[in-house]
Image (cartoon, helix red, strand yellow):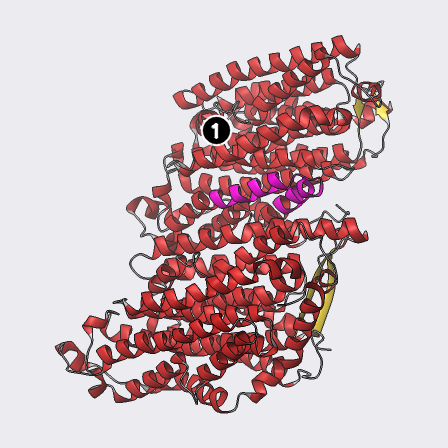
Amino acid sequence: MIPILSILIFFPLAAAVGLLLIPTSRSSVIRAVSLIIAGIEFLISLPLFFLYDETSAQMQFLERHLWVPGWGIEYHVGVDGISVLLIVMTTFLTLLSVPASWSSVEGHLREFMATLFFLLAGMIGVFASLDLFLFYVFWEVMLAPMYLIIGVWGGKNRIYAAVKFFIYTMAGSVLMLVGIMVLYFEHHAATGTYTFNLLELYKFHLRSDLQPWLFLSFFLAFAVKVPMFPVHTWLPDAHVEAPTVGSVILAGVLLKMGTYGIIRFAFPLFPVGMTMFAYPIFILSLIGIIYGALVAMVQTDIKKLVAYSSVSHLGFCVMGITAMTQKGVEGGVLQMINHGLSTGALFLLIGMLYERRHTRLISEYGGIAKVVPIYTVVFMIVTFSSIGFPGLNGFVGEFLILLGTFEVQPWIAAIAATGVILSAVYMLWMVQRVFFGVIHKEENRQLKDMNLREILYIAPIIVFIFWIGVYPEPFLAKMRVSVHGIIENICGIGGCQ
Amino acid sequence: MNDIYSFSPEILLSAGGLIFLLLQAFGGSRVSFLFTGLAIVFLLGAGYAAFLVPTGATMYFQGLWVADLLARIYKYIFLIGSLITVLLSSQYTKREDSMRNGEYYALILFATAGMMIMAGAQDLLIVFLGLELLSLSLYALAGSIRGNARSAEAAFKYFILGAFATALFLFGVALIFGAAKTTHLPAIAHMMQDNFIPSSYAVIGTMFILAGFAFKLALVPFHLWTPDVYEGSPMPVTVFMAAGAKAAAFASLTRIFLIAFERLSGSWQDPFWILAVVTMSVGNVAALVQVNIKRMLAYSSIAHAGYIMAGFFGAGKYAPGTIAFYLLSYTLMNGGVFAVVMLMAGKGEKRVSFDDFRGLANTRPMMALLMSIFLFSLAGIPPTAGFAAKFFIFSYAVENGHTALAVIGVLNSVVSVYYYLRLTVNMYMKEATPITREMDDERVPLFEKAALMICIAGTLLLGLFPVISHPP
């Protein structure tokens, strides 16, 4: 059996080292090689998607090797329906980011690509890990490359944003580390085995007085990553200061690790804790949805607007997952993919605008639809996707989430639905001010429309926006049985509302 | 005969030290080119001798000395630290005119021998013997840049305060002797049967011993000498002090408190807890405001001593191993950081502030990368040795019910990230200044390259394949 997952994790690492050996002067070679690396990575991930057995709730493509035997630490990786979708999305977005960075990265392109590939390895490692120690290692490993991407290649205030990102995220995560230790020793005290194996620990019923604490220690780490209100304040700075590709990966993939962690670790390991905190989590997600949308409305910088919209959209994801109903969780996971695609596309498009005018302020634009029609059409499609317009991908996810949440918390779902209206407000208002109306800045008349390279890297996302919107079944089918299995495991033990 | 045989590494090192003194006296500067290589030979020889000595619980010298697995592991750690120091000394002593002499290497070898004596000691007076041999050598080494006021200040401060600390230690030993009628550690341990109530002499004596060691380890509030001494000493000596002397003191602390005084743990764990928490916190907070890299690393050293103190809350026979693992990781990563700083600092150590490292990623990318890995390791970020070491130490604390200590420890790690990160900010995210561009041309000599390779290999390999393969 070919170890696909290990190849997916370690190939980018090896490739990054190889990339660093190419002399900086050969920039076209560097560009070509990085595209090839990202392409190979994406192609390797496709068998993961197509060969996945949709009828089984078990982890597939398993690989398991002893790492630190005495402590029960293993190199244990595997995927289920949820992680398969996330991994393919990750390689897909990375592939699209490479040509985007050719024009947006100013200086040290080679090092940027190498850092991106290190990050890629870490991200896939997080999605594939089935050993808690291994998971934590990959989780923290991602911090350094992202910190460098923001801090070296970012905007004016990048150092502040990068350091804030690093310390904020790490502070959230270290308590999870202690939580992992406590879980590990509690498991040993109860069963006599030392193991970090997730699948083993799923079967362990931690005593009820410890569950709230451990649940919180894990949940806090993920809540910071999502980001949920009130620990979301690192995101706007990170997004605004990050380079285009950095924002794409940050919004497209890194944020999903928070929601992924909740469904993979926090909820299944501590069902009693989950039940205890479900209602507060609903409230916080709701606040995130509404507050994120309201703050997005008043932004003057397009990127910051999209950053807050992420807070809002991911509030939906967390809400759907917390509902613990088949529709809710499926919607939450699908929306993770959708958000990755549409927000990733938004950041790519904003990046195109920034490369031309070097400003992201809404006030600097206006009426540019007349000058860049193709760009306008694409931007409109992505906007509608982000809003959740029926026929496009966002609608499917949000609808499932609201339906699933309504089954258990009708009032929460009802109020959350107003968030959909709010997202239409801030997005369409921004679009109206940027694209339509009168051209009041002369520089905008010189704007060039999308060139072939840009069209080529946006087009795949547009394809998926329509595909998932019209025919989401292939994607939902991948996760259906896994989601059902997860819900059964959790609700069987902790009891869901 | 067995006694002498078990002592062979120490004898070899001491002989080496004497040979250096003779070489300096009779050869002088004509043979100075030999010194570094010869020192390496002696260190490697001592390593081989330590390998040959069979490990076991046999007591040598009528019970004063033991050569078990723990002793051997610590001896290797000391030798690695000394090796790194000697490798870094090669260029350093060439650069500083006042330091080209054999006495420097003799003192390093004597100090290493002292460390080894501490690691194998089974009697409090033998601990004292090793401690003094180590300390006196270090006092002299601190001041070995002749004619430099900072160096002289460092030596003087270290000597005065160190002598005071040793006196405290000795007073504690005397009190213990008064209580137990012996200074032999296994005998003392044996006396602590069940329902053992220590007499007040014993308790006070233990506290004095702890105070003496707390000074040597630079635990708060006994740490005030550390920034000045670390800053003033020549950099290879700082590496030596930060890694080796700490390791030796922790080795003795392990033997005395964790092993011999195990039954007293109810009494000494409380002061250890306070020392650990206060040391970590004060060390980290003080490091936040430093602008001089050497002082920042001194405070970081203090903080790490605090983390290691958490290792004393592990129970069971593998707890000493975790402490040793941390010390090994620390020796390697700290050695690495200082190696890079030393190489970039220039003659007279003139470029040691944070600002002097601006834009290093552009002028010396490899150095910046190595430095970043060492800094991340010190901060405890995977997949480095620093992370593995912290993970194991805090795990032990959690296992024995001290979760609060682990939480404080990891939160302190987050605080420490800020000042380690600040250096990477300067290296990667700021423009190079004319000062940093000066560093452009200096090639890294062979010995220093070897030191860097040992450090980076160790930091990464120990992180990826942590050798603690025994159960917690």
Between A36 and B225, the one nearer to me in the picture: B225
Most foreground residue, B356 or B422: B422
Describe residue B411's horizontal placement relative to residue A182 as left or right: left
Residue that protrudes farthest toward the front in the picture = A411
x and y, in percent, of residue B364 in the image = 41, 52
Q: Which quadrant of the structure image shows residue B57?
A: top right
Residue at 48 percent of width and 58 percent of height: A224
In the image, the segment drawn in magenta is B390-415
Q: Would you say residue A226 is visible in this rendering? A: no
The image shows a total of numbered marks equal to: 1
- Position in image of residue B52 (x %, y %): 80, 36
Q: Residue furthest bottom?
A: A470
User: Few, some or many C-alpha atoms within 10 Å of disc 1 (few <14, some 14-19, many ≥20)?
Assistant: many
In the picture, the quarter occupied by the N terminus of chain B is top right
Q: Which residue is mark 1?
A: B230
At x 77%, y 22%, the residue is B122
Q: Which chain does the numbered disc 1 sit on?
A: B
Residue reaching furthest to the top: B178
Q: Is residue A189 above or below residue A149?
A: above
Where is residue B449? Give x, y as percent: 53, 46
Quarter of the image with the C terminus of chain B is top right
Task: Give amino acid for label 1.
Answer: Tyr
